[in-house]
Amino acid sequence: MSNRMPVKTTEVAFGVVEALLELGGARFTELVDHMDMPKSTLHDHLRTLESMGVVVKTDNVYRVGSRFLEIGAQARRQQPIYEAGRPEVEDLAEETGEHASLSIEERGRAVLLHVAKGANAVNLDAYAGRPTPLHANAAGKVMLAHLPKPRIDAIIEERGLTAYTPYTITDPTPLKRELEEIRRQGYATDTNELVEGVKGVAAPILDRGEVVGAIAVGGPANRMRGERFEETLPDLLLSASNIVELNLTYG
C-alpha cells in the first residue's frame, strides 16, 4: 500500500462538494465563510466543478449537480450483488410490509445499495448510498461478524463504537460476544441501537465463504417482537440471502 500523502487539490474539491451538501446549497460568500479559504481558491474550484457538471449555479446559489446521480447509479450497477439482491429486497418489502434493504461493507461502514418500502413501512431516512455504522444495526453487525477477526479489530480501532442511542453497544467485549452469537445462529438483530423505536433483522450474503453484503428488514419496535421478530423474519431473511447467494454463483 502506498504511503504517499493525498493530493491536496482533490481533498479540497471534495470538501467543497461536502460543504454544499451540508449547507443544502449556498451563495459564494456563505461558502467562503463556511470553508474559511481564500476567495480566489474557492472560485477556481467552483468554476472547475461547475464545468464538470458536478456543481450547478442557479440564481447565484451553488448546489451539488445531478451528475452524482449518474455516477452513483453506474457505481451501483457495477456491484454484482445489486442485480442479484434487488428482487429479493423488493419481495421482502412486499411480504413483510416493512422497510427492506441490501447493504455492503465499505471502508468499515455499512453502505445501503438498495431500499424498498412495504405498505406499512415507516420513514427511516434510508436511501441508496447512505453509510451507517457497522456496530449499531443488524445489517452492519451481521457483516462485521463474518469478517476476519483482525479486520474486526481494525474497524473498531479506526471507527470507534459511537453511542447513537442508550442501547448501542459501545464496549468491544460485549460486541465481540454478540458477533460470536451471530456467527452461530446465522443472523443478526438490533433493538433500538441506531434509532430508538426501530428494530431490525439481517442475514449475511456470502460468496465462496466471504461476506459480500447483507439483506435486512427493519420497522417499528411494536411490530418487531415475539415470534415474528425471533423466528418468522429470521427465516425469511435466511431464505432470501440463500437465493441471493445462488444468484451470485449461477446468475
Image: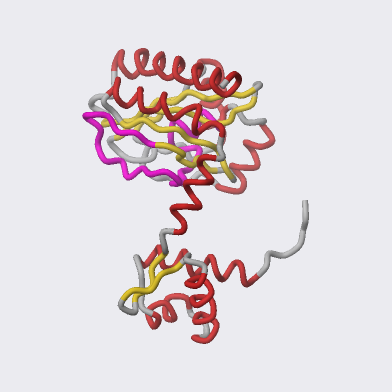
Q: Quadrant of residue 112?
A: top left
Residue occupying image coordinates x 29% and y 24%? 94
Q: Quadrant of residue 168?
A: top left
Q: Magenta stretch? A: 115-143
Q: Nearer the viewer, residue 110 or 87?
A: 87
The reply to whether the magenta stretch includes residue 125 is: yes
The reply to whether the magenta stretch includes residue 47 is: no
Residue 139's spot in the image, x, y percent? 46, 32
Residue occupying image coordinates x 35% and y 69%? 25
Relative height, residue 2 to residue 241 (above, below) = below
Q: How is the image coloured?
A: secondary structure
Residue 1's spot in the image, x, y percent? 77, 51
Relative height, residue 46 to residue 64 (above, below) = below
Which quadrant would the C terminus be assigned to in this image? top right
Question: Viewed as shown, does residue 158 lie left or right of 76?
Answer: right
Q: Nearer the viewer, residue 71 or 109?
A: 71
Residue occupying image coordinates x 51% and y 40%? 77
